[in-house]
Amino acid sequence: MTRMLIRNVAVLVVPEQGECRVDEAQDIHIQDNLITAITPTTPPTANAARGASAAGGPGAMGGAGDMGGPGAAGGVGGAGGSGGSGGELGVGEVVDGTGLVAVPGLVNSHTHSPMVMMRGAAEDLSIEDWFNQRIWPVEVNLTPERVRVGARLACAEMLLAGVTTFVDHYFHADQIAAAAIESGIRADLAPTYFSSAGQDGINAAIDTTRELSQLHPRVTASLGPHATYTVSDDDLKRTAEIARAEGLRIHLHAAETDEQTQASLDNHGVTPIQVLERTGVLDAGALIAHGCGIRESDLPILERYADRTTVASCPKVYLKLAMGEVTPIKGLRSAGVHVGVGTDGAAVHNTLDVWEAIRMVALTQKQREHDAEWMALSDALRLATRGSAAAAGLADQVGVLEPGRQADIALVDLGAPHNQPIHDPRAALVYSVRASDVVTVLVAGKVVVRDRRLTTVDLDEILADAKSLAHTLVDLSKGGAIQHYGP
Ligand SMILES: [Zn+2]
């Protein structure tokens, strides 16, 4: 049994409905992988001569310079209660949270992590050219090693930014699992397949899902048909049957653009969401990536499966590829469908920075609805926490800081000039915080980032490996492509 205490930290509280808030001066008690209690910080005892309470008392959040001053950021005490309070014998490691805000570890609810290896390699292209001229030709070069190196880089980037779970959809997923396990991050992995891979290729991907689902407590696995436009109805049907029979979820792309929805209507007489319904995918339980082409008429369908089907929104990608639409989050939420926040792959998003994705969601939703009051701070934070946890299939385990949940926690220092002075810490978390403001990160009760450094892996080695392999991945001299895009 391992105990840990995060002492004297401000805590982001995200209720199911209503306003989020930040509670000052809290202690987060952790035992093994779980949060066991969150209590007001015990005042220092009378004979604690060090004056430990000088920072972080009630009201500290409002004042410029009170937070994150020199020496205040995330120091880690030794065993046995270095905080100076009585009654802490046997608490194990004490992390000093003075001047920091504890937020639920972020969840990247849709990504293709190894695509960090293609960062900046496919710019200023239409969605057709992005797929057909760059990405699918590049992916001819995928090897287990290149995927592993990319996944290690991705895990490092995400953990340093306070992302504690990622929901992935890619090839060679066993290599991604190895990187996740090594780095200490939590992952849901969907080994990806196209119908063009044939039954053997599809079966191999499905077998990998089965293997990964048994591999490690921090790894879950989903079935990963690529999309409604690259996987046949028959293959989707078979996927749904396996999902239902074996208790697996399905993670796929659907209705990414309105153009795709219109093409589906023109060619098949149904929307992509109707395809997912009639093939049993929605009934089995699905995470739908993007859904920007979801029509008003699709909402009652999705409402019927809202207890098991979710949508991930990655708006930076929609802007960059000029897709014309963003995810209709307001309609989906009205239908009771949970929506999470994701980055998609870095071949278009350029980062795996979920803070950036949260900001993009808030901004694009206000613009979409022509309503500055929609996607308020609390809505954005709820989407990024509870919504993304639901999208990851981990709604009862992560996404909220409360007893019984996994101790997946990011401690954020809002002391930098771009956040100060603070009138509302929630506004800082949505609109001004940077990934580099994350100081300390725990996953399943284990410190994986301490004082902005990874504790689990050698970042220099990861960067060197990525640099040495990156050019081999984007070499198009072999010719060919793994798939062709045509909505
Ligand atoms: Zn995607």
Image (cartoon, helix red, strand yellow):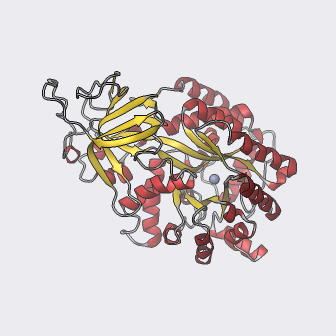
Give the answer, above or below, for where 448 lies relative to 61.
Answer: above
Image coordinates for residue 175, horizontal then vertical, percent: 69, 35
Of residues 217 and 440, the one nearer the viewer is 217
Res 121 seen here: no
**In which image quadrant can residue 113 be found?**
top right
Residue occupying image coordinates x 50% and y 68%: 333
**In which image quadrant can residue 84 be found?**
top left
Of residues 258 and 383, the one nearer the viewer is 383
Quadrant occupied by the C terminus? bottom right
Image coordinates for residue 248, horizontal then vertical, percent: 68, 52
Of residues 199 and 24, the one nearer the viewer is 24
Image coordinates for residue 93, horizontal then vertical, percent: 37, 26
Give the answer, above or below, for where 17 lies relative to 40.
Answer: below
Image coordinates for residue 413, horizontal then vertical, percent: 33, 39
Residue occupying image coordinates x 16% and y 25%: 48
Residue occupying image coordinates x 77% and y 47%: 206
Horizontal side of 37 relative to 464 (left or right) equals: left
Horizontal side of 340 relative to 370 (left or right) equals: right
Horizontal side of 335 relative to 240 (left or right) equals: left
Horizontal side of 414 relative to 368 (left or right) equals: left
